[in-house]
Amino acid sequence: MSAGPEDWRPGAELPVLRLRAERLAAARAFFAARGVLEVDTPILVGTAVTDPHIHSAVVQLPGYGRPLALHTSPEYAMKRLLAAGSGDIGQICHVMRGEERGRQHNAEFTLIEWYRLGWSMEALMDEVEALVRLLAAPAGAAAARHQSYAAAFDEALGVDPLTASETVLRAAARDRGLDPRAVPAGERDALLDLLMGGIVGPGLGHGAMCFLHRYPAGQAALACLDPDDPRVALRFELYLDGVELANGFVELADAAEQRRRFEADRALRRARGLAVPELDERLLDALAAGLPPCAGVAVGFDRLLMLATGATDIGAVMAFTTDRA
């Protein structure tokens, strides 16, 4: 149902849509010049993700015996290509995630995702910085700051996220106006997420990009643990003006460990009363066959464009948001 006679119009002004096209072309040229092969993987995939913080859209197509999911990231399919010998690859694609609404969120958005064989986390952070400077940062912007997750928590909250008790973390949240009662007892990483989203993250990246690295091992997701300190993962995120722009890993290649993490995700989803998807056995088979050492990252293109244009709502840089599609 139309909300009004002008509801058919795009949310973004035409000059912004032209800029969007220019920046997408610039991103493709950036990767082509660096020898990264552009690939194209399916939006419809066989299994939803197990991550308890990400919600897949499930669809039933006529003629298919089982439901399919709309991908939340091309990561699993791209890792299958890497295991098959693709070399460095990247893609720019639309992804879909449920329960993501707000000024910086839309259910459907554009990701730039790529993988580099044999690269360290530090090398990939440097390449992310170069891309962000090309697409969004003003000329002459200060060099990026690199800060560990633990150092950022200490600076913002005066607590050590690797050793602080759940009681201390709950007190830190209450003292700063957050409600820790929303986090069930025993979910320590969820408390850290509450503090990151409410206090630490919004304070990052003002004046210069900030790469936050070495997340707690419980938040490793698909990243390797740091061999020098297994309490933390070789994972990073990029913040600019308090906005999260990127999430990257030195990728886990151990199929058995990845299966264990997926099963832990499923157990947490079950405990929270969420849908519990099947495991992506094709991804696990690809890891078992041999994922080459690599680092990968996903960058939110729409948020980059928001920063480039000064937009305060993601709808101002998209033709049509989900509620007006």
Image (spheres, helix red, strand yellow):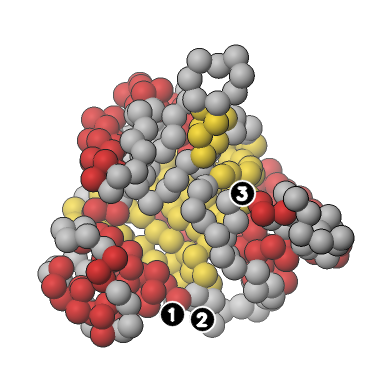
Above or below residue 259? Residue 22 is below
Residue 233, x across and y down, in percent: 28, 54
Confirm or deny contact between disc 1 and disc 3 (CB under 8 A): no
| Label 2 vs label 3, nearer the camera | 3
Identify the residue at horizontal 86%, vertical 62% (top origin).
6
Mark 1 — residue? 203
- What amino acid type should be assigned to the residue bearing mark 3? Glu
Residue 301, x across and y down, in percent: 63, 56
Q: CA distance from mark 1 to mark 3?
A: 26 Å
* Rendered image quadrant of residue 95: top right
Mark 3 — residue? 108
Confirm or deny contact between disc 1 and disc 2 (CB under 8 A): yes
N-terminal label among 2 and 3: 3
Above or below residue 57? Residue 211 is below
Element under disc 1: helix
Is residue 128 among the parts visible in the rendering?
no
Q: CA distance from mark 2 to mark 3?
A: 27 Å
Identify the residue at horizontal 40%, vertical 59% (top origin).
236
Q: CA distance from mark 1 to mark 2?
A: 7 Å
- What amino acid type should be assigned to the residue bearing mark 1? Gly
* Rendered image quadrant of residue 285: top left
Residue 48, x across and y down, in percent: 44, 34
Identify the residue at horizontal 49%, vertical 53% (top origin).
99
Mark 2 — residue? 206
Residue 312, x across and y down, in percent: 65, 74
Label 2: few (<14), some (14–19) or many (≥20) C-alpha neighbours in 10 Å: few
Q: On the rendered structure, is 41 left or right of 6? A: left
Element under disc 2: loop
Identify the residue at horizontal 39%, vertical 74% (top origin).
198
- What amino acid type should be assigned to the residue bearing mark 2? His
